[in-house]
Amino acid sequence: MRAVERPSVSEALNLVQEGLRQGRVVLLVGRCSVDYVGRASSRLGLGDRVVIYKPDGSILVHRPEGYEPVNWMPAGSYLTASSSEGRLNLRAVRRRPFEELKVSFMELYLAAAGRLIDEEELMLHASEEEMRRAVRLKPCLVEPGLKLHDEERHLQLAGGEGSADLVGEDAEGNLAVLELKRRRVDEEAVVQLKRYVDSLKARTPRRVRGILVAPSITRRALRLAQAFNLSFRRLDPKECSRVLREAEVEAKPLEAYEQP
Amino acid sequence: MRAVERPSVSEALNLVQEGLRQGRVVLLVGRCSVDYVGRASSRLGLGDRVVIYKPDGSILVHRPEGYEPVNWMPAGSYLTASSSEGRLNLRAVRRRPFEELKVSFMELYLAAAGRLIDEEELMLHASEEEMRRAVRLKPCLVEPGLKLHDEERHLQLAGGEGSADLVGEDAEGNLAVLELKRRRVDEEAVVQLKRYVDSLKARTPRRVRGILVAPSITRRALRLAQAFNLSFRRLDPKECSRVLREAEVEAKPLEAYEQP
DNA sequence: TGCTAAATCTCGAAC
DNA sequence: GTTCGAGGTTTAGCA
């Protein structure tokens, strides 16, 4: 990492251009204006900001407040740097959709660049995918006596009309179609499940139940679900995460036993 | 802005703690691990990252690739810094929802902090609000002969059952309810407009038309709209932006005339 | 490529 | 406070 405090325009330009060639992450802090044209367009007058440029072509402009960047370009953008009239100018463009971001520094407080190595993979828990795995492992999380079909059979039943998250049979032998949501169920999810239940009903003489599984549901969605004769079952993704962790520790000794 | 290359843990700790007290933006670059627990939970092993801490309590952890931060906390979080066993440890927490982010630096490449001032306001164009203003200015953007009611009358008609973007009358004197979307219309928008049209029909003997106004529409949403007897009119937010700019240059002389 | 659904979505306004 | 809808949403998964 090389850093220069209060760099001149030419020092900063050298650092940026060399950084671009060498695949370094570049940090610039200073007083600048920012213009964006693309899916929308924006203009931001002079102020102090932090600019991060990454070697994959993404660029971020952060103001001193707020979690979100005020302007940005996604990975794959093409960056150029130049100077004119005592200013350092950055320009990032991409095609499809065409977008252009320009940053013009009047004054620089810091310029830094360095090659950063990060090979680690993020482990994320309590996602919707984890809910699916937990319910598959313990269908009783949804209701007692529920049995789930395996993925292949589910896909056979799916057809073209959208798709449900899980399919199985309830304690009374009715077909049960599950729609899992990590967050509150809204009307869109209800409509989606209804469509799938209907397409299944058209292809089987059996009774088909639709069950929404989520930590909560909006009032409107609940009314709609009742009108469509769909059930709602409360299930917290955190509980699913816990169930999976417990299942893991139970499974580990077995695996160890099977190894030799 | 004060910057230290390859700072010791105590140097970095001083810089962070003083930065927190003084309301500075703090930048740290180094090899660290990151743990998050809250709405979900995640773990990220050792790697090189850029951490930005802002005086409003937001914190961002950026890997050398990708537009999005790998971990973050929103504004309002409470940050503390400490050192143990040669590591610099940052901890950010917030309540409601409870969330906690921990960053532990094994090695630091750069630490910097400075008070950044940014008073400018972002000017964003081609938003949905701009579409609304453009259609209000020139209803013929939607269809010839369309006339729009003013906002108050619209609110009277709205009632509790959701709300439409604009209400007026078409060339044949039917009530026309507009739903504007900056982006592609999806099924949710169709359902929303249908609900509003229905609630309006229940309160008037007149014919009521629902019109979706957006740059495009999904196939499913179009089918649903046809089933509900709702129209779709293509309108690009960019064109709205252009219309408003043209209207501005026409209006300016008038305003100047009215000033004295 | 286009479309759909998920996100630690964030953010802001209405209720 | 909660709920609801918009966003330059972004991003990942499929057809």
Image (cartoon, coloured by chain):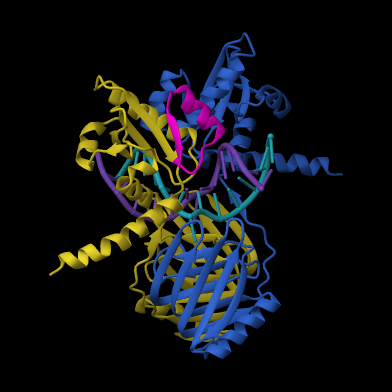
Chain colours: A yellow, B blue, C cyan, D purple
Q: Which of B119/B142 is in front?
A: B119
Task: List the single residue furthest toward the top.
Answer: B205
Residue B68: % across, % down: 45, 62
Which stretch is magenta? A214-234
Residue A147: % across, % down: 28, 38
Tell me the residue at 39%/40% (across/down).
Answer: A142
Say left or right for B238 vs B227. right
Tell me the residue at 38%/49% (across/down).
Answer: A131
Say left or right for A50 vs A80. right
Kindly indicate the quadrant of the structure image that contains residue A76.
bottom left
In the rendered image, residue B68 lying in the magenta stretch gets the answer no
Residue B223: % across, % down: 38, 24
Q: Can residue A93 be seen in this snapshot?
A: yes
Residue A56: % across, % down: 37, 67
In the rendered image, residue A227 lying in the magenta stretch gets the answer yes
Can you say whether B5 is above or below B256 in the image? below
Say left or right for A142 vs A161. right
Task: Give the position of the N terminus of chain A as an image quadrant.
Answer: bottom left
Task: List the single residue furthest toward the right.
Answer: B260
Q: Which of B12/A196 is in front?
A: A196
Q: Which of D7/B130 is in front?
A: D7
Kindly indicate the quadrant of the structure image that contains residue A48.
bottom right
